[in-house]
Image (cartoon, rainbow, N blue to C red):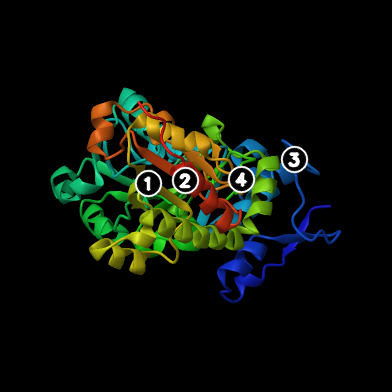
Amino acid sequence: MTETTANTLSEQTREGLSTRCVHAGDTRDLRGAIHPPLYGNATFAFESTADLLDLVEGRTQGNLYTRTGSNPTIRSLERKLADLEDAETALAFGSGMAAEAATFLAHVHAGDHIVCLGDVFGGTYGLLRDNLSQLGITTTFLTADELDKLPEVLTERVRIVFFETPTNPTLDVLDIAAIAAQAHAVGALVVVDSTFATPVNLNPLHHGADLVIHSATKYLGGHSDLIAGAVAGRAELLAPIGGWRGNLGQTIAPQVAYLLSRSLRSLVVRVRAQNATADAVARFLAEHPRVTRVNHPSLATGDQAALVKTQMRGHGGMLSFLVDGDATTTAAVVDRLRIFSIAPSLGGAESLVTQPITTTHHGLEPAERARRGITDNMVRLSIGLEDADDLINDLAHALDRPQPGP
Ligand SMILES: *Cc1c(COP(=O)(O)O)cnc(C)c1O
């Protein structure tokens, strides 16, 4: 018994995102399972040597060996991921870092150059600075305030321009179309890490990006119970990435692919709820006397506000704010929170809080943190699925407690 014909509504007409989250990539098996079953096996058997050769030599399609992604559970997830990003195809990985590493290794070679814009995830920074540099791949880092220097650093050695939007943890929104126009002029690919935005709030490929990457560990998984990653884009760009994935052994496990497909069915309702709660929390914090700054796309002004409007469909569940005080006072505020758990990561059902200097950006030198505006009094929130009022009360309590005297 194997999978039968595709029962995919979305192949005929383009439905809304919620419908596609539920149905895209689904095939119904002969027993009528309501969604694709989990094929947890490593390998697949053939009736004859001739059948095996037909598959290996590309005359038929089928399943062969799970490490290469040739597994129905993984392929079903990848069809859903591609559909949600409006991409020709997608590849699923064992982590977001695995997806990034394979993308860089496939498209940037020794002697080539990467340009990395704005704040990026700590692991990305380490991969570019410490690991890829050992292979003769160098990276120029520009902060979000230095984008006017992009023309100077865009030599024809640059193969990839990489960035997140909104960025972590300062929540700057970068103009994908403007950056893509400059990058494409020198033949570089534009790779956007869209982990914070999710396909609910943004489709980077619509704005000129060539590849979109997700740490599916975050919103796509949505329950802090799996580690996974994804890359989506044109098949011709994904093919070499798939080659690296297979040979480095970075493919997502079928069990995790199954769990991730499960989570993606509720992506839209989860992220829209998180968007609304984060907007309310941002408004509350912006008015609080002990908060000197709030970073959230809902509070953008001027050019940033115009860009948020044209590029994003929602503001996202991530925000950061500055406490009127030093690292110790800020830690005390964090420690008084009761509903927010102190933890790195983001995008789950439970709200999380972290001081970036203690976790995500702990590895950055103090001077580099200062250049990026990641100050000791910064707190980052990942808004979960709790009631907005409860989260606001928790923050009010943590901020309002009188400070201990000297
Ligand atoms: C977490 C994260 C990553 C890395 O993903 P993993 O799944 O932990 O490997 C990359 N980019 C961003 C923006 C992240 O938040």
Point out the tag, 3 or 4, that comes first from the N-terminus: 3
Furthest residue in direction bottom, as rendered: 13
- Residue at the disc numbered 4: 57
Judged by depth in the image, the label closer to the viewer, 2 or 3, is 2
Q: Earlier in the sequence, mark 1 or mark 2?
A: 1
Q: Which comes sooner in the sequence, label 3 or label 1?
A: 3
Query: Pointer 2: what residue?
Result: 381
Query: How many angstroms separate mark 4 from mark 2 (CA)?
Result: 51 Å
Q: Secondary structure at mark 1?
A: strand
Ligand 1 within 8 Å, label 2 CB: no
Image spot of residue 194 (x, y percent): 43, 51
Q: Which mark is residue 2?
A: none
Spatial distance from mark 3 to mark 4, Cα to Cα? 25 Å
Label 3: which secondary element: loop
Residue at 35% over, 60% down: 299
Q: Which residue is mark 1?
A: 321
